[in-house]
Image: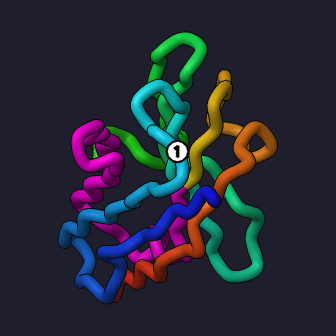
Amino acid sequence: QVQLVESGGGLVQSGGSLRLSCEASGLTLEHYAIGWFRQAPGKEREGVVCISSASGNTYYGTFVKGRFTISRDNAKNAFYLQMNSLKPEDTAVYYCATEPLAFTCSEREYDYWGQGTQVTVSS
């Protein structure tokens, strides 16, 4: 059974940083596409940053602008989202996702999802 468990969300002031973690079980992440998505109240879920398993390319949401970084630790079967210079508009539930074969940062390409972790940025 595949399971993704996120951690690291919380409340942070504007300009602060958070690091989200996503630990996987039931599969080996090393060759999978990995991604972080978010959903703010009243909005659709959107891609934050993803690494394609097809090309190895990294895709960023337009709002990221160099503030967020995705990384992977194969030994721990986990991946991470480092978020710096956080803004109130980054407030959302953040989800990690993985898929054997994904080309872009579209949620439609991902079948395995975590439960989400709340990130709240105060002004």
Residue for point 63% across, 74% down: 40
- Give the labeled residue for mark 1: 27
Q: Is residue 113 above or below residue 10?
A: above
Q: How is the image coloured?
A: rainbow
Residue for point 61% across, 57% down: 2
> Residue 10 or 52: which is nearer the viewer?
52
**Where's residue 97, x and y in %?**
58, 51
> What segment carries the magenta color?
68-96
Mark 1 falls on what kind of element?
loop
Asked if the magenta segment contains residue 71, the reply would be yes
Q: Is residue 8 above or below residue 35?
A: below
In the current view of this chain or complex, which residue is farthest to the top? Answer: 55
Residue for point 54% across, 53% down: 26
- Amino acid type at circle 1 is Leu
Q: Is residue 102 above or below residue 37?
A: above
Asked if the magenta segment contains residue 81, the reply would be yes
